[in-house]
Every structure is written in C-alpha cells, then in structure tokens.
Amino acid sequence: MENIVINTVEMHTGGEPLRIIKSGYPEIVGKTILDKRKFVKDNLDALRKFLIYEPRGHYDMYGAVQVVPDIANADVAFLFMHNEGYSTMCGHAIVALGRYCVDNKLVPYKEPETEINIQCPCGLVKAFVNCANGLTSSVRFRSVPSFTVKSDIEVSVPAYGTLKVDLAYGGAFYAFLPLNDVGLNENSPIEQIKSAASAIASVVKGQEAIVHPESADLSYLYGVIFTDDMTGPYFNLTVFADAQVDRSPCGSGSTARVALLYHKKLIGLGESVEIKNPLTNSSFKATAVEETHCGEYRAVRVEICGNANYTGTATFTAEAQDGLKEGFLIA
Ligand SMILES: O=C([O-])C1=[NH+]CCC1
C-alpha cells in the first residue's frame, strides 16, 4: 500500500460523490467486464477500501475506475465501487463520467451533443453530453432494458409490520415502497431511514428470488428506495450497498422507478417525470423512451437526464508507518 500513488478527479451528481480514478491503479484483467469486476473484488479490494473508506473517503463515498471494454461498440468502460463492493450500474456516475470522458478527450468533442457508449457491468449505456462553446454541461443517458419483476409483494418486517414492496430493475434491482409506510418522512433521522431500509432488504432478500435473465452476477437486490406515495410529486430516497444513502435521486433507481410507473400505466412512452431526492432537492428528468424486452420480461428503455459538477482533484498516498493506511469505516 505504501507505494501507491492514485490520482483522482472528484465530481458530484446531485450531491452524490464520484471519485474517478485517473491514474495509479494496477492493471485490471479479465475477459469480460463482469470478469474484471470479479478480478478487482478478489485481488484489488484493498485499493477500494483505501479510496472509499476514511480518512480518504467516508461511509457514503462512491468511485469509478476505467477498464478496457470487451464489446465492440463501447467507447469506454467503467467499474463502480462503494462501501460494500462493486455495483452493476450507477446512473449518477454515468452523468459525471459523460462530462469527464469528453473533458478528458476520451472521445472526440462534438456539438451540440457528444455521444459516448459506456460499457457498465449491467451492459451498454448510451450517454449524450451537452456541448457548447467548448464546454460540457448536462448529460442524458439511455440505460439497459428495465423492467418490473413483481409489484405489491407482501413482506413481514420485524418492527415495521406487514408492508407491500415493488421489485424493479434499472441496471440494478431495487425494492420500492412509500417512506410513510414505515412511519417515517424525509425529515426523519437518517439512521431511522437506514435501519428501516436494512430490515426490509433483509426480508426481501430472504423471500424473493432476484434473478436477471442474462447473468447471475446481476442477480441480487442492490437497495431499497423509499418513495412518495407513488402518485407524485416523485421522489427517491435510496439506501443501497451497506446502508449507503444516495444524495442524488439515483440514476439506476430512477430508471427502475420509470419501469415501475410504466408497468403501473402511470407513465406512457415519450412521457417524462421529474424525480427528486428529498434530502438535497437534486433532481433527474426521467423519460420512458421505447418498449423492449429482457428475457421473459416486457421492458422499457428509460432515459435519465441530470447534471454533474467537478469538486476537485486529488493524489492519494500512504506511508509505510501509517497504521491506518488501509482505511477504516465508522458507521
Ligand atoms: O445513480 C445511481 O444509479 C446510484 N447512485 C448510488 C447508487 C446507485
């Protein structure tokens, strides 16, 4: 660890951080991006902790590292990391990476929009970066086919009673339910919101088979999204990984939310909704674009549009005598 020098570019999307590794990471090998995701998990996880954990990061830090794409029509590829491991999709990261890739000339700059095909563990995501006068601004992306697995699933959660959740996929699987169904609201202490999410996630994981038609590596519940009363104004309060709280409306969660709204006929093709995060008031515009399929699921292609900003750059190192050089987390 002590010979590590990692340079990063720091951004945020709607308040959710993204630590983009610009240089200093060892080579990440693997035939496919899911193999690469397994490689970093098995061989380089100390570096995830070094960057995500304190004192360099914090409990809710999020990161991305570039890898070589393994599909022909991808311009770039990224792995995503958080306080528990490596995710399959991250929409807030795509919004930030869209600007990062254009600004760092990973793709040719083109006005009024630069298109970037970004390979993620869940598949290919097509991003469009708003470009004018040599500058980048908002980013919209079209995610992988998204679908509702099941709605109105009855779960019995200790301390919260019998609840109903909806299960949907937007590059990652989420369980959705109104925040006030657990007797909380957006002003409740965040620890109470996190505790409720963890209790619900534990029951859903034990009760429901989470299976993606394409890969076992995608088949797991990534988080719980607390919502408005489902009729709008729409908000997502996402608790994911190890009780990490998304400060943005959650791009993959908003994608899954639109799949759910489409399934419930609360939104039609071509229609958009604004989805906010009630803690930061940041928002994404989410649009149901076209119907598609994923395995046996009727799916929808969703477009998310948002804004990311740079917050700085960093060079992270460790000294041999530092007893905490590998990082730590205080929850
Ligand atoms: O935007 C996104 O999809 C996410 N942000 C953090 C967890 C997933």
Image (tube, grey):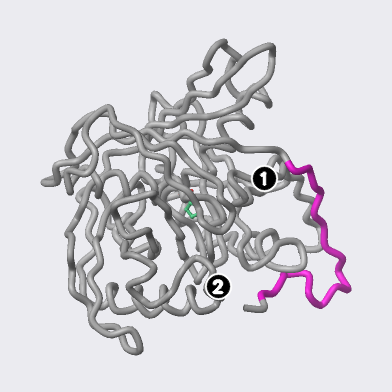
Taking the magenta stretch, the answer to whether it contains residue 327 is yes
Residue 281 spot, x, y in % from top left: 56, 50
Which residue is under mark 1? 21
Residue drawn at (81%, 49%) of the image: 315
- In the orientation shown, which residue stands out farthest toward the bottom? 159
Inspect this view and state whether residue 34 appears.
no
Q: Earlier in the sequence, mark 2 or mark 1?
A: 1
Mark on residue 114?
A: none
Specify the amino acid type for callout 2.
Answer: Ile
Residue 126 spot, x, y in % from top left: 41, 28
CB under 8 Å between discs 2 and 1: no
**Above or below: residue 267 compared with residue 191:** above
Report whether 27 appears left or right of 202. right
Mark on residue 190?
A: 2
Specify the amino acid type for callout 1.
Answer: Ile
Report whether 105 appears left or right of 243. right
Residue 182, picture quadrant? bottom left
Gap between marks 2 and 1 measured at Cα: 29 Å
Circle 2 packing at 10 Å, graded few (<14), some (14-19), many (20+), is some
Q: Secondary structure at mark 1?
A: strand
* Magenta region, residue range: 311-329
| Image quarter in which the C terminus is found | bottom right
| Image quarter in which the N terminus is found | bottom right
Q: Main secondary structure of the magenta part?
A: loop
Residue 100 spot, x, y in % from top left: 64, 32
